[in-house]
Protein backbone atom coordinates (compact mmCIF):
# COMPACT_ATOMS: atom_id res chain seq x y z
CA UNK A 1 0.00 0.00 0.00
CA UNK A 2 1.40 3.27 -1.09
CA UNK A 3 1.31 6.71 0.37
CA UNK A 4 -2.44 7.08 -0.39
CA UNK A 5 -1.88 10.03 -2.66
CA UNK A 6 -4.86 12.17 -3.74
CA UNK A 7 -7.28 10.91 -1.16
CA UNK A 8 -9.34 12.24 1.68
CA UNK A 9 -6.78 12.88 4.36
CA UNK A 10 -7.98 10.57 7.07
CA UNK A 11 -9.61 7.78 5.11
CA UNK A 12 -7.05 5.12 4.38
CA UNK A 13 -6.76 4.95 0.62
CA UNK A 14 -4.62 2.44 -1.16
CA UNK A 15 -2.97 2.75 -4.55
CA UNK A 16 -0.47 -0.06 -5.14
CA UNK A 17 -2.49 -3.23 -5.47
CA UNK A 18 -0.58 -6.47 -5.31
CA UNK A 19 -2.56 -9.01 -3.45
CA UNK A 20 -2.41 -12.74 -3.04
CA UNK A 21 -4.11 -14.59 -0.25
CA UNK A 22 -3.32 -18.28 -0.11
CA UNK A 23 -4.66 -20.08 2.93
CA UNK A 24 -1.94 -21.63 5.08
CA UNK A 25 -2.64 -24.94 6.81
CA UNK A 26 -2.57 -24.93 10.56
CA UNK A 27 -0.74 -27.67 12.45
CA UNK A 28 -2.73 -29.81 14.82
CA UNK A 29 -0.73 -29.23 18.00
CA UNK A 30 -3.38 -28.55 20.60
CA UNK A 31 -1.36 -30.43 23.18
CA UNK A 32 1.58 -28.07 22.65
CA UNK A 33 -0.20 -24.77 23.22
CA UNK A 34 1.14 -22.94 26.25
CA UNK A 35 -0.39 -19.48 26.28
CA UNK A 36 -1.59 -16.54 24.23
CA UNK A 37 1.39 -14.64 22.84
CA UNK A 38 -0.21 -11.20 23.03
CA UNK A 39 -3.48 -9.76 24.20
CA UNK A 40 -5.04 -8.09 21.18
CA UNK A 41 -7.33 -5.53 22.74
CA UNK A 42 -8.58 -3.25 19.96
CA UNK A 43 -7.58 -4.76 16.60
CA UNK A 44 -10.22 -6.96 14.99
CA UNK A 45 -8.13 -8.15 12.06
CA UNK A 46 -5.45 -10.37 13.62
CA UNK A 47 -4.53 -12.60 16.50
CA UNK A 48 -1.37 -14.38 17.65
CA UNK A 49 -1.01 -17.69 19.48
CA UNK A 50 2.11 -19.26 20.94
CA UNK A 51 2.93 -22.95 20.91
CA UNK A 52 5.96 -24.71 22.35
CA UNK A 53 7.99 -24.57 19.16
CA UNK A 54 6.24 -22.08 16.91
CA UNK A 55 3.84 -19.13 16.74
CA UNK A 56 0.65 -18.85 14.77
CA UNK A 57 -0.37 -15.52 13.23
CA UNK A 58 -4.02 -15.41 12.26
CA UNK A 59 -5.07 -12.68 9.83
CA UNK A 60 -8.82 -12.54 10.35
CA UNK A 61 -9.55 -9.91 7.71
CA UNK A 62 -6.85 -10.06 5.03
CA UNK A 63 -8.86 -8.14 2.42
CA UNK A 64 -12.28 -6.45 2.15
CA UNK A 65 -15.22 -8.81 2.71
CA UNK A 66 -12.92 -11.79 3.26
CA UNK A 67 -14.83 -14.97 4.12
CA UNK A 68 -11.89 -16.83 5.64
CA UNK A 69 -8.83 -16.16 7.76
CA UNK A 70 -5.23 -16.73 6.75
CA UNK A 71 -2.94 -18.63 9.09
CA UNK A 72 0.85 -18.26 9.07
CA UNK A 73 3.31 -20.35 11.05
CA UNK A 74 6.35 -18.58 12.50
CA UNK A 75 9.22 -20.88 13.49
CA UNK A 76 12.26 -19.85 15.47
CA UNK A 77 15.58 -19.89 13.63
CA UNK A 78 17.19 -21.33 16.74
CA UNK A 79 14.82 -24.32 16.74
CA UNK A 80 14.44 -25.09 13.03
CA UNK A 81 16.63 -25.24 9.95
CA UNK A 82 15.44 -23.68 6.73
CA UNK A 83 15.51 -27.08 5.05
CA UNK A 84 13.06 -28.38 7.67
CA UNK A 85 10.39 -25.75 7.04
CA UNK A 86 7.03 -26.67 5.58
CA UNK A 87 5.85 -24.72 2.56
CA UNK A 88 4.74 -21.27 3.67
CA UNK A 89 6.45 -21.38 7.06
CA UNK A 90 8.33 -18.24 8.09
CA UNK A 91 11.55 -18.20 10.11
CA UNK A 92 11.84 -15.56 12.82
CA UNK A 93 13.34 -13.26 13.82
CA UNK A 94 13.32 -11.81 10.32
CA UNK A 95 16.67 -10.47 9.10
CA UNK A 96 15.65 -9.05 5.71
CA UNK A 97 12.16 -7.77 4.95
CA UNK A 98 10.25 -6.08 2.14
CA UNK A 99 7.10 -4.11 3.08
CA UNK A 100 4.56 -2.53 0.78
CA UNK A 101 3.11 0.36 2.77
CA UNK A 102 4.73 3.47 4.20
CA UNK A 103 2.60 2.86 7.29
CA UNK A 104 4.84 -0.12 8.11
CA UNK A 105 7.97 2.04 8.29
CA UNK A 106 7.25 3.68 11.69
CA UNK A 107 6.52 0.29 13.23
CA UNK A 108 9.87 -1.09 12.08
CA UNK A 109 11.60 2.00 13.45
CA UNK A 110 9.83 1.90 16.82
CA UNK A 111 10.97 -1.71 17.20
CA UNK A 112 14.53 -0.73 16.22
CA UNK A 113 14.36 -2.94 13.12
CA UNK A 114 14.59 -0.38 10.31
CA UNK A 115 17.92 -1.89 9.21
CA UNK A 116 16.08 -5.08 8.21
CA UNK A 117 14.24 -3.24 5.42
CA UNK A 118 15.90 -4.09 2.09
CA UNK A 119 13.26 -3.14 -0.49
CA UNK A 120 10.19 -0.97 -1.00
CA UNK A 121 7.94 -0.05 -3.88
CA UNK A 122 8.34 3.59 -4.92
CA UNK A 123 10.66 4.77 -2.17
CA UNK A 124 9.85 8.43 -2.87
CA UNK A 125 6.74 8.00 -0.74
CA UNK A 126 8.82 7.31 2.38
CA UNK A 127 9.15 10.41 4.56
CA UNK A 128 11.09 9.16 7.61
CA UNK A 129 14.51 10.83 7.75
CA UNK A 130 16.03 7.73 9.32
CA UNK A 131 14.86 5.40 6.55
CA UNK A 132 15.54 7.97 3.83
CA UNK A 133 19.22 7.94 4.85
CA UNK A 134 19.26 4.17 4.30
CA UNK A 135 17.57 4.60 0.92
CA UNK A 136 20.09 7.26 -0.13
CA UNK A 137 22.94 4.99 0.99
CA UNK A 138 21.66 2.14 -1.16
CA UNK A 139 20.57 -0.15 1.66
CA UNK A 140 16.91 -0.06 0.58
CA UNK A 141 16.29 -0.95 -3.07
CA UNK A 142 13.59 0.52 -5.28
CA UNK A 143 11.09 -2.18 -6.29
CA UNK A 144 9.14 -0.32 -8.95
CA UNK A 145 6.70 2.51 -9.47
CA UNK A 146 2.94 2.66 -9.26
CA UNK A 147 1.35 -0.77 -9.95
CA UNK A 148 4.39 -2.73 -11.12
CA UNK A 149 6.64 -4.62 -8.71
CA UNK A 150 10.12 -5.42 -10.02
CA UNK A 151 10.33 -9.08 -9.05
CA UNK A 152 13.80 -9.45 -10.57
CA UNK A 153 15.23 -7.01 -8.03
CA UNK A 154 13.18 -8.66 -5.30
CA UNK A 155 14.64 -12.08 -6.13
CA UNK A 156 18.14 -10.61 -6.06
CA UNK A 157 17.49 -9.29 -2.55
CA UNK A 158 16.24 -12.68 -1.31
CA UNK A 159 14.31 -11.25 1.66
CA UNK A 160 13.17 -13.55 4.45
CA UNK A 161 9.67 -12.16 4.07
CA UNK A 162 7.45 -9.87 2.01
CA UNK A 163 4.66 -8.13 3.94
CA UNK A 164 1.96 -7.34 1.42
CA UNK A 165 -1.61 -6.13 1.44
CA UNK A 166 -4.58 -7.41 -0.51
CA UNK A 167 -7.71 -6.18 -2.22
CA UNK A 168 -8.97 -9.66 -3.05
CA UNK A 169 -8.05 -13.33 -2.72
CA UNK A 170 -5.59 -13.88 -5.55
CA UNK A 171 -2.64 -12.13 -7.17
CA UNK A 172 -0.14 -13.42 -9.70
CA UNK A 173 2.75 -11.33 -8.39
CA UNK A 174 2.54 -12.70 -4.86
CA UNK A 175 2.07 -16.23 -6.21
CA UNK A 176 5.24 -15.83 -8.26
CA UNK A 177 7.18 -14.59 -5.23
CA UNK A 178 6.04 -17.56 -3.16
CA UNK A 179 7.00 -19.99 -5.92
CA UNK A 180 10.54 -18.64 -5.60
CA UNK A 181 10.56 -19.73 -1.97
CA UNK A 182 10.03 -16.25 -0.48
CA UNK A 183 7.14 -16.18 2.02
CA UNK A 184 4.43 -13.54 1.63
CA UNK A 185 2.26 -12.55 4.59
CA UNK A 186 -0.80 -10.37 4.15
CA UNK A 187 -1.18 -7.39 6.48
CA UNK A 188 -4.74 -6.13 6.95
CA UNK A 189 -4.07 -3.22 9.29
CA UNK A 190 -5.62 -0.69 6.92
CA UNK A 191 -9.02 -2.39 7.34
CA UNK A 192 -9.21 -1.64 11.07
CA UNK A 193 -12.11 0.58 12.09
CA UNK A 194 -10.63 2.32 15.13
CA UNK A 195 -7.44 4.37 15.60
CA UNK A 196 -6.12 2.19 18.43
CA UNK A 197 -7.01 -0.96 16.49
CA UNK A 198 -4.81 0.20 13.63
CA UNK A 199 -1.91 1.10 15.92
CA UNK A 200 -2.08 -2.26 17.69
CA UNK A 201 -0.71 -3.96 14.58
CA UNK A 202 2.74 -3.14 15.92
CA UNK A 203 2.25 -6.42 17.81
CA UNK A 204 2.09 -8.18 14.44
CA UNK A 205 5.54 -6.83 13.59
CA UNK A 206 6.71 -7.64 17.10
CA UNK A 207 5.98 -11.32 16.43
CA UNK A 208 8.06 -11.24 13.23
CA UNK A 209 11.12 -10.03 15.15
CA UNK A 210 10.60 -11.96 18.41
CA UNK A 211 9.99 -8.60 20.07
CA UNK A 212 6.52 -9.15 21.50
CA UNK A 213 7.33 -7.55 24.84
CA UNK A 214 8.79 -4.46 23.19
CA UNK A 215 5.79 -4.15 20.85
CA UNK A 216 3.36 -4.52 23.73
CA UNK A 217 5.19 -1.86 25.75
CA UNK A 218 5.21 0.59 22.81
CA UNK A 219 1.52 0.07 22.16
CA UNK A 220 0.59 0.51 25.81
CA UNK A 221 2.29 3.91 25.81
CA UNK A 222 0.44 4.98 22.65
CA UNK A 223 -2.83 3.70 24.13
CA UNK A 224 -2.23 5.55 27.40
CA UNK A 225 -1.46 8.81 25.57
CA UNK A 226 -4.57 8.43 23.41
CA UNK A 227 -6.90 7.74 26.33
CA UNK A 228 -5.38 10.63 28.26
CA UNK A 229 -6.05 13.01 25.36
CA UNK A 230 -9.60 11.68 25.05
CA UNK A 231 -10.20 12.35 28.74
CA UNK A 232 -8.85 15.88 28.39
CA UNK A 233 -11.22 16.56 25.48
CA UNK A 234 -14.20 15.44 27.54
CA UNK A 235 -13.53 18.22 30.04
CA UNK A 236 -14.71 20.85 27.57
CA UNK A 237 -18.32 21.84 26.99
CA UNK A 238 -17.28 23.56 23.77
CA UNK A 239 -18.19 21.37 20.81
CA UNK A 240 -17.36 23.23 17.60
CA UNK A 241 -18.95 22.00 14.39
CA UNK A 242 -16.67 20.22 11.92
CA UNK A 243 -16.65 19.95 8.13
CA UNK A 244 -14.22 17.69 6.30
CA UNK A 245 -13.27 16.51 2.83
CA UNK A 246 -13.70 18.25 -0.50
CA UNK A 247 -14.68 17.64 -4.11
CA UNK A 248 -12.27 15.10 -5.58
CA UNK A 249 -13.77 14.40 -8.98
CA UNK A 250 -17.00 14.57 -10.96
CA UNK A 251 -18.42 17.25 -8.64
CA UNK A 252 -18.75 14.68 -5.85
CA UNK A 253 -17.79 15.72 -2.33
CA UNK A 254 -16.07 12.94 -0.38
CA UNK A 255 -16.18 13.05 3.40
CA UNK A 256 -16.00 10.42 6.16
CA UNK A 257 -19.08 8.41 7.11
CA UNK A 258 -20.37 8.53 10.66
CA UNK A 259 -19.08 5.03 11.47
CA UNK A 260 -15.66 5.57 9.90
CA UNK A 261 -12.15 5.54 11.26
CA UNK A 262 -12.05 9.34 10.95
CA UNK A 263 -15.39 9.89 12.66
CA UNK A 264 -14.00 7.95 15.63
CA UNK A 265 -11.16 10.49 15.94
CA UNK A 266 -13.65 13.36 15.88
CA UNK A 267 -15.91 11.64 18.42
CA UNK A 268 -12.98 11.12 20.79
CA UNK A 269 -11.94 14.76 20.31
CA UNK A 270 -15.40 15.72 21.66
CA UNK A 271 -16.37 17.87 18.67
CA UNK A 272 -19.58 17.98 16.67
CA UNK A 273 -18.89 16.29 13.35
CA UNK A 274 -21.87 17.25 11.23
CA UNK A 275 -22.18 13.80 9.64
CA UNK A 276 -21.66 11.83 12.87
CA UNK A 277 -25.09 10.21 12.60
CA UNK A 278 -24.64 9.00 9.03
CA UNK A 279 -24.15 5.33 8.20
CA UNK A 280 -21.05 3.98 6.56
CA UNK A 281 -17.49 3.07 7.57
CA UNK A 282 -15.87 4.61 4.52
CA UNK A 283 -16.44 7.80 2.55
CA UNK A 284 -19.77 9.41 1.85
CA UNK A 285 -20.23 10.78 -1.66
CA UNK A 286 -22.41 13.86 -1.63
CA UNK A 287 -23.34 16.79 -3.84
CA UNK A 288 -21.85 20.21 -3.19
CA UNK A 289 -25.30 21.58 -2.51
CA UNK A 290 -26.08 19.08 0.24
CA UNK A 291 -22.73 19.72 1.95
CA UNK A 292 -23.11 23.49 1.70
CA UNK A 293 -26.63 23.30 3.07
CA UNK A 294 -25.43 21.53 6.19
CA UNK A 295 -21.94 22.94 6.74
CA UNK A 296 -21.92 26.49 5.42
CA UNK A 297 -21.40 27.83 8.95
CA UNK A 298 -19.21 25.02 10.31
CA UNK A 299 -16.60 26.32 12.76
CA UNK A 300 -13.67 24.29 11.39
CA UNK A 301 -12.81 22.58 8.15
CA UNK A 302 -10.33 19.80 8.84
CA UNK A 303 -8.59 17.90 6.03
CA UNK A 304 -9.92 19.48 2.82
CA UNK A 305 -8.84 16.67 0.52
CA UNK A 306 -5.40 16.92 -1.03
CA UNK A 307 -5.42 20.74 -1.17
CA UNK A 308 -2.55 22.54 0.54
CA UNK A 309 -3.56 26.21 -0.06
CA UNK A 310 -6.77 28.22 -0.23
CA UNK A 311 -5.75 29.38 -3.69
CA UNK A 312 -5.68 25.77 -4.91
CA UNK A 313 -9.12 25.25 -3.48
CA UNK A 314 -10.59 28.25 -5.27
CA UNK A 315 -8.99 27.18 -8.55
CA UNK A 316 -10.82 23.89 -8.14
CA UNK A 317 -14.13 25.40 -7.05
CA UNK A 318 -14.76 29.08 -6.41
CA UNK A 319 -17.77 28.27 -4.21
CA UNK A 320 -15.49 27.09 -1.39
CA UNK A 321 -15.12 30.75 -0.41
CA UNK A 322 -18.78 30.78 0.66
CA UNK A 323 -18.05 28.61 3.70
CA UNK A 324 -17.58 30.44 7.01
CA UNK A 325 -14.55 28.28 7.91
CA UNK A 326 -12.89 29.39 4.65
CA UNK A 327 -13.68 33.05 5.26
CA UNK A 328 -12.38 32.97 8.85
CA UNK A 329 -9.26 30.98 8.02
CA UNK A 330 -10.24 27.94 10.06
CA UNK A 331 -9.06 25.32 7.56
CA UNK A 332 -6.42 22.81 8.62
CA UNK A 333 -4.52 20.47 6.35
CA UNK A 334 -1.80 17.84 6.66
CA UNK A 335 -0.86 18.12 2.99
CA UNK A 336 1.80 20.76 3.69
CA UNK A 337 3.97 18.62 5.96
CA UNK A 338 5.97 16.41 3.63
CA UNK A 339 9.18 14.43 3.55
CA UNK A 340 12.26 15.20 1.44
CA UNK A 341 10.87 13.46 -1.64
CA UNK A 342 7.26 14.58 -1.34
CA UNK A 343 5.68 11.92 0.82
CA UNK A 344 2.98 13.24 3.17
CA UNK A 345 4.12 12.57 6.74
CA UNK A 346 0.55 12.04 7.97
CA UNK A 347 -0.06 9.09 5.66
CA UNK A 348 3.07 7.36 6.93
CA UNK A 349 3.10 8.06 10.66
CA UNK A 350 -0.48 8.80 11.72
CA UNK A 351 -1.78 5.19 11.74
CA UNK A 352 0.95 4.23 14.22
CA UNK A 353 0.55 7.39 16.33
CA UNK A 354 -3.20 8.02 16.68
CA UNK A 355 -2.45 9.70 20.01
CA UNK A 356 -0.75 12.54 18.14
CA UNK A 357 -3.59 12.81 15.62
CA UNK A 358 -6.11 13.13 18.43
CA UNK A 359 -4.04 15.78 20.18
CA UNK A 360 -3.81 17.71 16.91
CA UNK A 361 -7.59 17.78 16.56
CA UNK A 362 -8.04 18.85 20.17
CA UNK A 363 -5.42 21.57 19.78
CA UNK A 364 -7.17 22.88 16.65
CA UNK A 365 -10.70 22.87 18.04
CA UNK A 366 -10.09 23.56 21.77
CA UNK A 367 -6.58 25.02 21.97
CA UNK A 368 -6.84 25.99 25.64
CA UNK A 369 -6.97 22.32 26.59
CA UNK A 370 -3.43 21.70 25.30
CA UNK A 371 -1.60 24.98 25.82
CA UNK A 372 1.94 23.62 25.45
CA UNK A 373 1.27 21.20 22.59
CA UNK A 374 2.39 21.98 19.03
CA UNK A 375 0.66 20.43 16.04
CA UNK A 376 2.38 17.33 14.68
CA UNK A 377 0.56 16.66 11.39
CA UNK A 378 -1.75 19.59 10.67
CA UNK A 379 -1.20 23.20 9.77
CA UNK A 380 -3.52 26.14 9.26
CA UNK A 381 -4.06 26.54 5.55
CA UNK A 382 -2.76 29.75 4.00
Image (tube, rainbow, N blue to C red):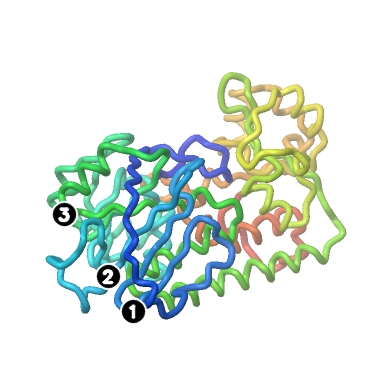
Residue behind mark 2: 75
Determine whether label 1 and label 3 are within 8 Å by CB: no
Q: Is residue 342 visible?
A: no
Instruction: Determine the residue positioned at 39% across, 72% down.
Output: 30
Q: In this view, does 228 lie above or below 338?
A: below
Residue 53: horizontal and vertical position, in percent? 29, 76
| Within-10-Å neighbours for mark 2: few <14, some 14–19, many 20+ | many
Q: Real-space Cα distance between discs 1 and 3?
A: 31 Å
Q: Quadrant of residue 117?
A: bottom left
For numbered disc 1, what is the local secondary structure? loop
Look at mark 1 in the image and give the residue it sits on: 52
From the viewer's perspective, is 310 left or right of 48? right
Give residue 356's mark: none
Q: In this view, does 37 lie above or below 24?
A: below
How far is disc 3 from disc 2 in space, using C-alphas?
21 Å
Which of discs 1 and 3 lies nearer the camera? The answer is 1
Residue positioned 16% across, 55% down in the render: 158
- Estimate how packed mark 1 is, as few (under 14), some (14 to 19) or many (20 or more) residues with alpha carbons within 10 Å: few
Mark identifier at residue 157: 3
Q: Nearer the viewer, residue 32 or 284?
A: 32
Residue at 21% x, 46% y is: 177
* Secondary structure beneath label 2: strand
Q: In the rendered view of the protein, which quadrant contains the N terminus?
A: top left
Amino acid sequence: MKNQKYSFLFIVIFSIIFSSCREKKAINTNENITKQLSEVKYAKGFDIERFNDYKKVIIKTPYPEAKESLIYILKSKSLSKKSELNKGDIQVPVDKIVVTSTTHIPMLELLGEENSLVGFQDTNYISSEKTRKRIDSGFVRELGKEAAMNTEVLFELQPDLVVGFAMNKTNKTYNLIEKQGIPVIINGDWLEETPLGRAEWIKFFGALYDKEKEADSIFKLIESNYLEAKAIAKKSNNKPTILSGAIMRNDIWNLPGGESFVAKFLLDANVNYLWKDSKGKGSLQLSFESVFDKAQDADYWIAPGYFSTKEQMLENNSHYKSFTAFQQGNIYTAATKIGATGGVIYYELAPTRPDLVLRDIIKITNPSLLLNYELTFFEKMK
